[in-house]
Image (spheres, helix red, strand yellow):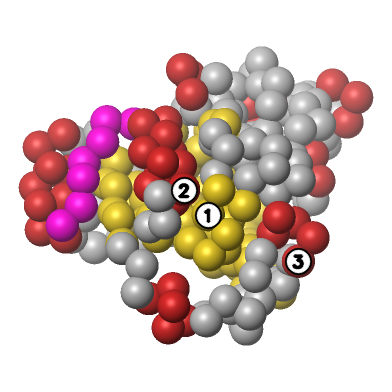
Amino acid sequence: MVENHRMGLLSRGGVGISLGLLLVLSWVVVSNPTLGATSNSLKKEVIYLVGADESATKAAAGRVGGTAVSSLTKAFAAAVADLSAGSNVTIKLAAGDYNGDFGSGAYALGVINAPTATLKLEGGFKPDFSSRSPFRLPSMIVATPQRSAPLLKFAANSKLGAFIVDGVSWDSQASNSYDAKTNSLLYGKSCTFPFVQFYYFSCFTNLSSRFLL
């Protein structure tokens, strides 16, 4: 489970703060390279589905034994509690824009104390979750022009066995400024916050991933 980790990225506008649009095909960050698949597979699996079509999302949640929630903010809050209680958590996102906590263009997670658990964030699902296609049906975390934080921020001193992002798009173009003639990024006028911030998140020091550009 943790030996061969890949991150597939499609981007527009370069790297760093000039990275306006990011599609994560598969991103795995692992804090415990010795975590055994057997012990992890014995954990309770909790699934949350997030989609704009409330009835379709509830029906899909019933089919997979999951829970439908009305926003990604609520899904993250529930996931923090479940992870800290020892469960693995998967959050599935229907296609659409996700605009952050209270429309801020950014999400902040509470402290997680789950050194052997896994959090998965999967996007690109149809409204009824019957299939997925991240390219045709993007689940987009969208920044705002006034963004003053990372698009996704883990609380300091969190502990998590693995964090997996699959088929989710991140769009920070609204928080960047571009030259009107060349469309080049204006570094001094663009947001310098990263897409994801781990602080002292334990997996940061044991990153075991390969980047495919």
Query: Looking at the image, which residue is at 79% across and 39% down?
Result: 17
State the quadrant of the C terminus.
bottom right
Query: How packed is label 1: few (under 14 Cα within 10 Å), some, or many (20 or more)?
Result: many
Horizontal side, residue 167 vs residue 126: left or right: right
Of residues 15 and 63, which is closer to you in this image?
Answer: 63
Observer-nearest residue: 65 or 38?
38
CB contact under 8 Å: marks 3 and 2? no
Q: Is residue 47 above or below residue 33?
A: above
Q: In the figure, 191 relative to 38: above or below? A: above
User: What residue does disc 1 label?
Assistant: 114
Circle nearer the N terminus (1, 2):
2
What SS does tag 3 mark? Answer: helix
Residue receiving disc 3: 206
Q: Amino acid at mark 2?
A: Ser
Q: CA distance from mark 1 to mark 2?
A: 5 Å
Quarter occupied by residue 45? bottom left
Observer able to see residue 97: no
Type of amino acid under label 1: Ala
Contact, mark 1 vs mark 2 (Cβ under 8 Å): yes
Q: Position of residue 29 (x, y in %)?
A: 63, 63
